[in-house]
Image (cartoon, rainbow, N blue to C red):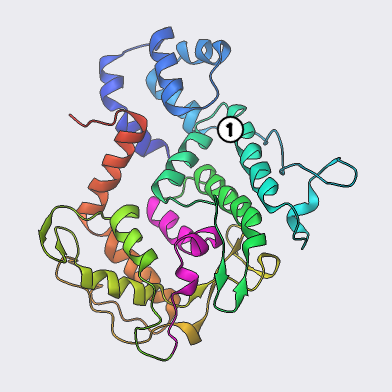
């Protein structure tokens, strides 16, 4: 992360030579961490801008204050941590609250920027557990949502502590079980009737909110950065990526070790996926021999567009600096 972050703070480094001092150290800490204390401010105040940013962003994330969420059972009212790996269907709502409490408690004890960056990723690739009911396609996974939420938050932590690019984050979040349920991509399937089984919800959000952004509307169905037809093409690319029957049976991502969704080739739309001239690059149209390669090619195509970089720059500024961009 060092190079990218240091590039962003070059103006600060130019203006502020030598130690930050208390005022700027406190300002930086408020922007970049949930852990605010006089001791941490005093520590940063003695450093120059470069060293202070390195300390916040490149330091190893400390061991979590709580390794796993605690949950009180109804029989003995004692805290337990192994409920995540159980297959019980009790107190789902309280378990979701326990996961949220676990993450929030860890965040305020984390003196680095990792939890703040994880929150940025969560707001960028927005999902939710609140009121989420996952059913359909022969599955009922509502009782797994608390565990999907736990996996989602662990994924965000993995992305931040390993310095992963936004492009790779977009790839990982696509197969995140909570996201697959929240934006219905688990129901985005080829049911043998052409496109009638396709669900465009995730494809639309991926383009409009998660990556390139719409830009100005030029005409009905045509935007500055993509078209409505491109949303349909994206839904074709995302088709067939779904959840397993149970979270405990989910495929483990070999890189993260976290349960993730699965590519079901028999549910994938194998027809053409030609994108509009809004997407300039050698990888257009997308038509690869297998689902994973096709997904990678599509994401490369989206991230090759300058509008995607600009959209992320705006998101970063609004999250860490100010809502209004002057």
Percent of width and height locating residue 227: 19, 67
The outermost residue toward the left is 218
Residue at position x 42%, y 44% in the image:
123
Name the residue located 63 percent from the left edge and 50 percent from the top edge.
Answer: 150
Q: Quadrant of residue 64?
A: top right
Q: Nearer the viewer, residue 324 or 111?
A: 324
Query: Which residue in the structure is indicated by mark 1?
Result: 107
Percent across and percent down for residue 91 are: 73, 51
| Left or right: where 269 falls relative to 283 | right
Q: Which residues are magenta?
A: 166-191
Q: Is residue 241 left or right of residue 282?
A: right
Q: Report the number of numbered marks.
A: 1
Residue 36 x, y percent position in the rendering = 53, 19
Q: Is residue 257 visible from the viewing direction of this image? A: no
Magenta residues, dominant SS class: helix
At which x and y percent is residue 287? 31, 81
Q: Is residue 110 left or right of residue 318?
A: right
Residue at the right extreme of this rendering: 76
């Amino acid at each position: 992360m060092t190079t990218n972050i240091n590039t962003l703070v070059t103006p600060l480094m130019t203006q502020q030579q030598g130690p930050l001092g208390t005022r700027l150290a406190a300002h930086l800490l408020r922007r970049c961490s949930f852990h605010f204390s006089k001791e941490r401010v005093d520590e940063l105040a003695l450093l120059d801008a470069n060293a202070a940013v390195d300390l916040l962003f490149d330091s190893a994330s400390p061991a979590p204050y709580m390794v796993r969420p605690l949950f009180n059972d109804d029989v003995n009212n004692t805290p337990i941590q192994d409920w995540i790996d159980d297959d019980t269907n009790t107190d789902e709502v309280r378990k979701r609250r326990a996961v949220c409490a676990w993450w929030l408690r860890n965040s305020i004890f984390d003196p680095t920027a990792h939890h703040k960056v994880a929150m940025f990723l969560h707001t960028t690739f927005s999902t939710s557990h609140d009121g989420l009911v996952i059913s359909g396609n022969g599955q009922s996974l509502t009782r797994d949502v608390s565990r999907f939420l736990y996996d989602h938050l662990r994924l965000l932590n993995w992305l931040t502590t390993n310095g992963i690019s936004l492009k790779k984050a977009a790839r990982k979040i696509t197969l995140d079980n909570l996201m697959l349920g929240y934006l219905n991509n688990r129901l985005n399937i080829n049911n043998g009737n052409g496109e009638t089984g396709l669900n465009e919800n995730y494809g639309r959000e991926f383009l409009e909110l998660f990556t390139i952004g719409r830009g100005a509307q030029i005409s009905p169905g045509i935007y500055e950065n993509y078209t409505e037809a491109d949303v349909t093409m994206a839904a074709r690319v995302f088709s067939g990526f779904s959840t397993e029957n149970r979270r405990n049976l989910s495929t483990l991502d070999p890189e993260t070790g976290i349960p993730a969704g699965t590519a079901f080739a028999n549910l994938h739309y194998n027809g053409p996926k030609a994108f509009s001239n809004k997407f300039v690059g050698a990888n257009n149209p997308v038509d690869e021999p297998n689902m994973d390669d096709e997904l990678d090619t599509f994401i490369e195509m989206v991230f090759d567009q300058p509008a995607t970089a600009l959209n992320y720059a705006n998101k970063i500024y609004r999250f860490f600096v100010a809502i209004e961009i002057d």
